[in-house]
Each structure stands twice: as structure tokens, then as C-alpha cells.
Image: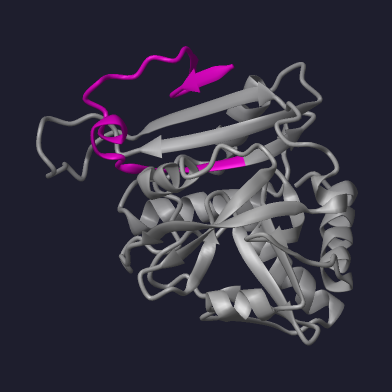
Amino acid sequence: MILVNGTPGAAITAMDRGVAYGDGVFRTFRARGGCALQWRRHYSKLAHDCTALAITAPPADMLENEISSACAGEAECVVKIIVTRGASERGYAYSSGAETTRIVVAAAEAAAHPADHASVGVRVRLCSLRLSHQPALAGLKHLNRLENVIARAEWSDASISEGILLDREDHVIGGTMSNVFAVMSGALITPALDRCGVAGVTRDRVIDAASALGTACSVTTLSWTDLLASDEVFVVNSLVGVWPVRELNGAERGLGPVTRNIQRALQLEDDAKVA
């Protein structure tokens, strides 16, 4: 089911700035029984990213109703919300009064990845592409994702589940579709995203879960050498949850207790509530 501004259908004008310039933001998450999991967090991120780009965010209750409608009849759904600045004339300049475009896409949740990725871990490689720095867009889930597309095209081996992205200074930033955490001496480290990268909802959840568990967690620069030397590595996003890394760029790794504790904490939270 696809809703464009609340109406079923997949058509938008070719003059939409999301099509022409990638001028917009998006979120992707799971829904259960027509209700988005971790909705308050996802909407908060959506609204934050809209504000950062001076785009008017759709009201939360409007989007909730559209998610429920789009997921009708499905026990589990994958939902994607796209908000663009709307249609405009040619040129980069835009009118502050432009009417935004909102798109809600819902599909029955399919097993896109093997179910045992969370239990046995995944193989991960280092991408050759280096992310550029743009502090004005850092952390935002904007529609310009060509760097990720190019990086993901670097491998076709189906046994490799993710690729690690470094910036031009060889600092670890994240995966092509995920945020990254390392464990060193029992403490969590996740890369700072003040110059590039996407700050995902599950990244925030892991940081909060670590605090609740009494596990130290720092947000700082992380080199590739640091990642290789760490005791545990895992990647996260809102669709796959927490994937332990069992092989990093060809080197076998163990699956450790900190990763397992974080997995359990997030699963318990999802099982306990829908919102």
C-alpha cells in the first residue's frame, strides 16, 4: 500500500523536489498490528530532520493514521515515510510556502535476511568508498543516499551482510545501512556523527539501553584499527535490530556478552510495548 498525501497511489509530480534534488527526509521501521514500533522516537527524528532542512513536518497523528491505514490487515509491516519539500519550479531556490509531499509506503514484512543473523552473527567487509564531510547534513536521514548506493555496489557476495564506511580521515562512521558499535574492555563505543553519517533510532536505543544496564558508552572518533582491535562489534538498524559481527574483513571474531545483553534489552522493550 502506498499513500501520497493520504491518497492511495504511487504517482507524484516530476517537479517534486524530492525527485529533482533529493530535497527531503525519510524513516524506515517496523509496524505491528498497524502501529509503528518505537513511533515516538521515529517521529522525533523525522521532525528533527525536517526542521534542520526547514521543511514542515506532517503532524504525528496524521502519519499514525496513515500508517494504520496502509498496514491494514497485516500483522507485521515494514513502513517507509518520505517527506519532501514538495513541488517547485526549476532551480535550487525554493519558496518557504511550498506544500510538502508526504509518502507512506507499507509492505508485509518479508524475511529479507536470514533469521539466524541475530544469533550466529554476520560477515562484514570494509568499503573502499570514503564518506565526504558535510556538517550541515551530518546525522540527518536525508534523501541523498548515493554514497551508500555506490558503497553497497562494491560487493555481490550474498554471504556478506554489510559494509563498513570510513570518512576521508579513515574514521569509522557506520555501515551502508546501519550504525556501528564496538566493545572495548566491557565499554561501548559508537562513532561521532558530527561531520557525516546517519544517527539512527536504534543507535539511540542502544545508548539508552547501555545506560540502563550500567554499561559505559561513549560517542567519539573510532579508527579502523580500533575497530579491528575491539573485543566485540555489532551493527544495528530499525529493521534488523542488532547483528553481532562474527567476521570483520575476513578476520573471525567471537560473539560476546555485551552484544547479547544489548540484544536482550532491545527485544524486551519491543515485546513489552508497541509505541
- Quick check: 254 above or below 175? below
Q: Residue at x 67, y 32 (%)?
A: 78
Horizontal placement of 47 versus 179: left or right? Answer: left
Verify whether residue 16 appears in magenta: yes
Where residue 200 sits, quadrant-wise, is bottom right
User: In front: 85, or 22?
Assistant: 22
Horizontal placement of 148 versus 269: left or right? Answer: left
- Quick check: 110 above or below 229? above
Task: Tell me where residue 77 appears, x and y as whole percent.
Answer: 71, 28
Q: Residue at x 33, y 47 (%)?
A: 55
User: In front: 264, or 256?
Assistant: 256
Verify whether residue 13 appears in magenta: yes
Q: Quadrant of the N terminus?
A: top right
Q: Residue at x 47, y 12 (%)?
A: 9
- Quick check: 115 above or below 198? above
Task: Tell me where residue 6 appears, x and y as whole percent.
Answer: 49, 21
Horizontal placement of 167 versus 107: left or right? Answer: left
Task: Tell me where residue 192 appears, x and y as whole percent.
Answer: 51, 75
User: In front: 65, or 75?
Assistant: 75
Extreme residue in the front direction = 250
Task: Tell me where residue 167 appears, x and y as whole percent.
Answer: 40, 68
Q: Is residue 56 visible?
A: no
User: In front: 116, or 14?
Assistant: 116
Where are the magenta residues, as a range?
1-28
- Quick check: 163 above or below 206? above
Color style of the picture: one colour
